Image (cartoon, helix red, strand yellow):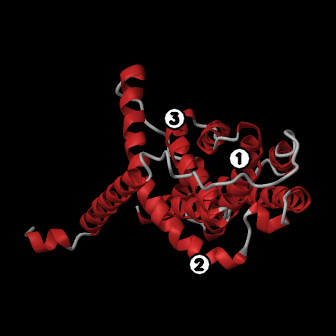
């Protein structure tokens, strides 16, 4: 195979694109670090969002989400014990979407009730959508090298502690969409992963928890770090926690810097979309 044939290979093109993306991210991150004095000046103009939430309020939609999903999955397993695996995966993702939508409705109610300027004060202003989308793409490119390096470092440390067989397991949803080829289950996974989860999780963790934490801690970076740690440990696989923490720091920063909740939603959405597309491509 000559060089022209190698260049035409899809894997080669993806590798070149990945290197280009990584390089662009490194340059963008370096520029940000220099411009903000290693991040110290990045949030000097960021003001806390005015609200009258109590400390327990963000836990209400969190418990509704976990409780409704756990109960619905248990009931479904009891009523339909003999479903094929792909149908069970489809039903579980449908339950996840419905549970997240119910909890999201509660979050909207709390935002309207507790935030100054209601939804706009919460960070949901449709006028900022175009600007937030392009800024989110740029933010994701900037944090991408850190996420990749964190994953590599996690594997290296994991192998030193638990042996050479240590691997970071694939996210459950990525496993499912790679395993089942049936259209209904794939559509539901895509909806749940790329649309529902980013919207709900950012409204919950950034919109409510980060805002509440900052009301007590005041310092924006400390609030982002505490919220990011909570965001990471809520996910089930501990091997994912370091990379999720790094990604969440970017999500939290984008919210504090812009005041818009759409920006971390778009970052989260694009990040999940990359994972889904890579699995479907393979």
| Residue holding disc 2 | 130
Give the quadrant of the N terminus: bottom left
Q: Earlier in the sequence, mark 3 or mark 1?
A: 1
| Residue holding disc 1 | 210
Secondary structure of the residue carrying tag 3 is helix
Q: Earlier in the sequence, mark 2 or mark 1?
A: 2
Mark 2 crowd level (few <14, some 14–19, many ≥20, 10 Å Cα): few
Count of marks placed on residues: 3
Picture coordinates of residue 100, whole percent (x, y): 78, 57
Picture coordinates of residue 105, whole percent (x, y): 86, 62
Give the quadrant of the C terminus: bottom left
Which of these two is toward me, 279 or 224? 224
Q: Are marks 3 and 1 in contact (CB under 8 Å)?
A: no
Q: Is residue 14 visible?
A: yes
**Which residue is located at x 53 percent, y 55 percent?**
179
Mark 3 crowd level (few <14, some 14–19, many ≥20, 10 Å Cα): some
| Residue holding disc 3 | 239
Mark 1 crowd level (few <14, some 14–19, many ≥20, 10 Å Cα): many
Q: Is residue 88 visible?
A: no
Secondary structure of the residue carrying tag 1 is helix
**Which residue is located at x 61 percent, y 63 percent?**
258
């Amino acid at each position: 195979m000559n060089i022209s044939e190698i260049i035409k290979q899809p894997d080669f093109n993806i590798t070149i694109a990945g290197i280009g993306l990584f390089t662009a991210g490194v340059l963008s991150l370096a520029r940000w670090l220099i411009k903000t004095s290693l991040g110290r000046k990045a949030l000097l103009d960021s003001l806390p969002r005015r609200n009258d939430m109590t400390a327990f309020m963000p836990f209400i939609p969190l418990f509704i989400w976990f409780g409704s999903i756990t109960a619905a999955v248990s009931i479904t397993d009891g009523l339909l014990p003999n479903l094929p695996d792909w149908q069970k995966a489809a039903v579980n993702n449908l339950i996840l979407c419905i549970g997240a939508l119910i909890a999201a409705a509660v979050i909207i109610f709390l935002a309207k009730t507790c935030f100054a300027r209601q939804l706009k004060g919460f960070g949901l202003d449709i006028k900022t959508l175009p600007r937030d989308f392009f800024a989110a793409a740029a933010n994701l490119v900037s944090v991408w090298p850190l996420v990749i390096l964190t994953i590599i470092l996690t594997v290296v440390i994991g192998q030193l502690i638990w042996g050479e067989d240590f691997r970071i397991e694939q996210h459950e949803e990525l496993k499912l969409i790679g395993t089942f080829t049936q259209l209904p289950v794939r559509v539901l996974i895509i909806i749940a992963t790329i649309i529902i989860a980013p919207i709900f999780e950012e409204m919950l963790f950034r919109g409510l928890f980060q805002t509440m934490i900052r009301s007590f801690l005041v310092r924006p970076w400390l609030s982002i770090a505490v919220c990011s740690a909570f965001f990471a440990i809520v996910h089930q696989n501990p091997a994912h926690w370091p990379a999720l923490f790094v990604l969440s720091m970017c999500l939290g920063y984008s919210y504090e810097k812009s005041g818009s909740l759409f920006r971390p939603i778009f970052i989260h959405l694009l990040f999940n979309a990359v994972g889904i597309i890579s699995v479907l491509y393979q």
